[in-house]
């Protein structure tokens, strides 16, 4: 859910598509990971919960939908707050 919400907010701020490479794990011997969008990265993060045995597929799908809604609410509130100032 958090990754999906963050993806919506980041897409709103940086635009879409926004390709990037995540190299934060390089010091730990992991290769850099490239993504074509924030949404792609969020979907991969969600899928990792299934592979890790943390969530079932239905919970992942529910969390992605809920995260999308939370992200849209955050963007809406930020726009409303910015317009009020």
Image (tube, rainbow, N blue to C red):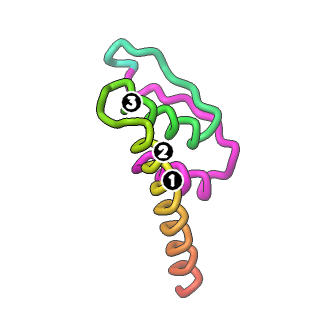
Q: Mark 1 points at which residue?
A: 65
- State the extent of the magenta-drawn residues as a range: 1-25
Horizontal side, residue 32 vs residue 16: left or right: left
Residue 25, placed above or below residue 80: above
> Count of labels shown?
3
Q: How far apart are marks 3 and 1 (CA)?
A: 16 Å
Label 1 environment density (alpha carbons within 10 Å; few <14, some 14–19, many ≥20): some
Q: Where is residue 50 in the image (x, y as percent from the top left)?
A: 39, 30
Q: Where is residue 7 in the image (x, y as percent from the top left)?
A: 53, 49
Label 2 environment density (alpha carbons within 10 Å; few <14, some 14–19, many ≥20): some
Q: Which of marks 2 and 3 is nearer the N terminus?
A: 3
- Asked whether the residues under the numbered discs 2 and 1 touch, taking CB atoms below 8 Å apart as contact, a structural biologist would say yes
Residue 23, placed above or below residue 45: above
Tell me what residue is drawn at x 70 percent, y 43 percent: 17
Horizontal side, residue 28 vs residue 83: left or right: left
Q: Where is residue 75 in the image (x, y as percent from the top left)?
A: 54, 67
Does residue 58 belong to the magenta stretch? no
Tell me what residue is drawn at x 37 percent, y 33 percent: 49
Does residue 18 belong to the magenta stretch? yes
Q: Position of residue 60 (x, y in %)?
A: 43, 42
Residue 85, placed above or below residue 19: below
Q: Mark 3 points at which residue?
A: 50
Q: Nearer the viewer, residue 65 or 12?
A: 65
Q: Mark 2 points at which residue?
A: 61
Q: Which of 25 and 57 is in front in this view?
A: 57
Q: Distance between the residues labelled 2 and 3?
A: 11 Å
Q: Splitting the image into 4 quarters, where does residue 24 fall?
A: top left
């Amino acid at each position: 859910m958090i990754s999906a919400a963050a993806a919506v907010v980041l897409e709103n701020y940086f635009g879409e598509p926004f390709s990037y490479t995540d190299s934060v794990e390089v010091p730990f011997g992991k290769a850099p990971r490239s993504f074509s969008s924030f949404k792609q990265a969020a979907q991969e993060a969600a899928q990792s919960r299934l592979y890790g045995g943390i969530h079932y597929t239905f919970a992942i799908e529910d969390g992605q939908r809920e995260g999308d809604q939370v992200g849209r609410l955050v963007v809406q509130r930020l726009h409303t707050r910015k317009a009020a100032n």
